[in-house]
Image: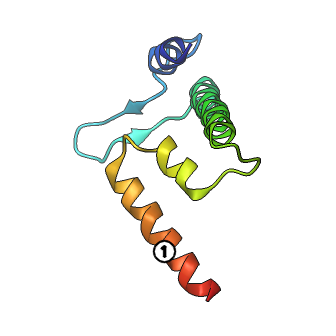
Amino acid sequence: MIDSLIAEATAGGANGQSALVSSTNSKPPRVIVTPQFVHAVSSIVWAHCNRMATDLDAFAKHGKRSVVSVDDVKLCVRRNPALVEHLAEFAAGLKGKRR
């Protein structure tokens, strides 16, 4: 599904116009955003959010909890070390404010 959305975004719309970038010789590139591109990106983001919500729910249920915890979110983003570190710092800041 995601691959077809990316292909749709990079192929351009029905009129063959590229959805990504159109450039001229000496000027900075002019970005053209078509409705098809916006739809493709929003579909990808929506699919990712749905997948992440499903994963978070599964992690919480596996831990026999009804509420998603910070640890569930860290587990969900475990493949992005910088984001895990940022979330750990953010969680530590939240704990410090509660005291």
Q: Position of residue 43 (x, y in %)?
A: 64, 27
Q: Quadrant of residue 44?
A: top right
Q: Residue furthest bottom?
A: 99
Tell me the amino acid under the disc marked 1.
Answer: Ala
Q: Nearer the viewer, residue 88 or 99?
A: 99
Q: Position of residue 74 (x, y in %)?
A: 48, 51
Q: Position of residue 47 (x, y in %)?
A: 63, 27
Residue at x 34% of width, y 42% of height: 29
Is 31 placed above or below 83 here?
A: above
Is 86 placed above or below 11 here?
A: below
Q: Nearer the viewer, residue 35 or 65?
A: 65
Residue at x 71% of width, y 47% of height: 65
Q: Which part of the image, by quadrant, shows the N terminus?
A: top right
Q: Residue furthest front?
A: 64
Q: Residue furthest right?
A: 66
Crowding near the residue tagged with mark 1, few <14, some 14–19, many ≥20 C-alpha atoms within 10 Å: few
Q: Position of residue 73 (x, y in %)?
A: 55, 50
Q: Which residue is mark 1?
A: 92
Q: Which part of the image, by quadrant, shows the C terminus?
A: bottom right
